[in-house]
Amino acid sequence: MSSNVTVRVTDVVVRSAGNDVVVRSDGPRIVAAGGSGPAGPTWEGYYGSFSDSTTQTTAANTATPMTFNTTEESNGVSIGSPTSRIVIANAGTYNVQFSAQMDKTDGGRDDATIWFRVDGVNVPRTATDITIEQSARRIVAAWNFVYTFTAGQYFELVWSSPDSSMRLLSEGTSSNPTRPAVPSVILTVTRVA
């Protein structure tokens, strides 16, 4: 016999060293309020989901920030000016995840590097190199960073290549079967602490 059960938890009591803290859900907000113990912190569900519908190019050997022209959803995270900047309105630790569809327009073998930059400063140990062989061959660069921001900071995803034929490729909707467009870059940002 099978059955479907839906459980909705609205309050959880956490007990530590004799102090009770009630954690209460309020839509996208999780509020920790003191019970018999001290008041807990307030934690907001800050997030952002962004994409870009254009094919992005770079000049050879030039640090080029990836740009975004669409906000899918957001709360406390937004596209800044210029549109390569993602602005974090509220301090906290965030998980930054992205995927970028890359290809090149000439033959041979070419490299590209992607890295993380905060407030215009390259973050140490965040670069990764990618190699593409042959023209019209696509790869997806996809990884994540965890970073603790202060309120109002911004970050950028930056890329470069010694060959200007490398690009971040966007494609329109397709048929047989019908399927969505492919953005050049997809980015999600989620506060984790």
Image: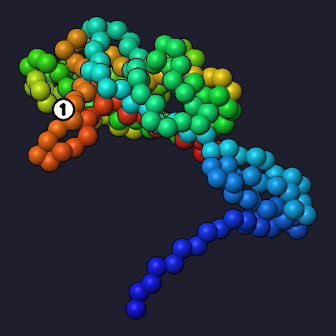
Q: Is residue 79 left or right of residue 31?
A: left
Q: Which of 98 and 50 is in front in this view?
A: 50
* Kind of residue at disc 1: Arg
Residue 9 in view, yes or no:
yes
Residue 147: x percent and y percent? 57, 34
Image quarter where the N terminus lies is bottom left
Q: In this view, does 119 lie to the left or right of 82?
A: right
Image quarter where the C terminus lies is top right
| Residue depicted at 45% across the width and 84% down the height | 3
Which element is circle 1 on?
loop
Q: Residue furthest bottom?
A: 1
Q: In this view, does 89 lie to the left or right of 47?
A: right
Rendered view: 141 above or below 85: below
Residue 125: x percent and y percent? 47, 28
Q: Quadrant of residue 157?
A: top left
Q: Quadrant of residue 69?
A: top left
Q: Nearer the viewer, residue 108 or 98?
A: 98
| Residue depicted at 19% across the width and 14% down the height | 165
| Residue depicted at 51% across the width and 78% down the height | 5
Residue 14: x percent and y percent? 77, 65
Residue hosting label 1: 138
Q: Which of 10 and 145 is in front in this view?
A: 10
Residue 146 in view, yes or no:
no
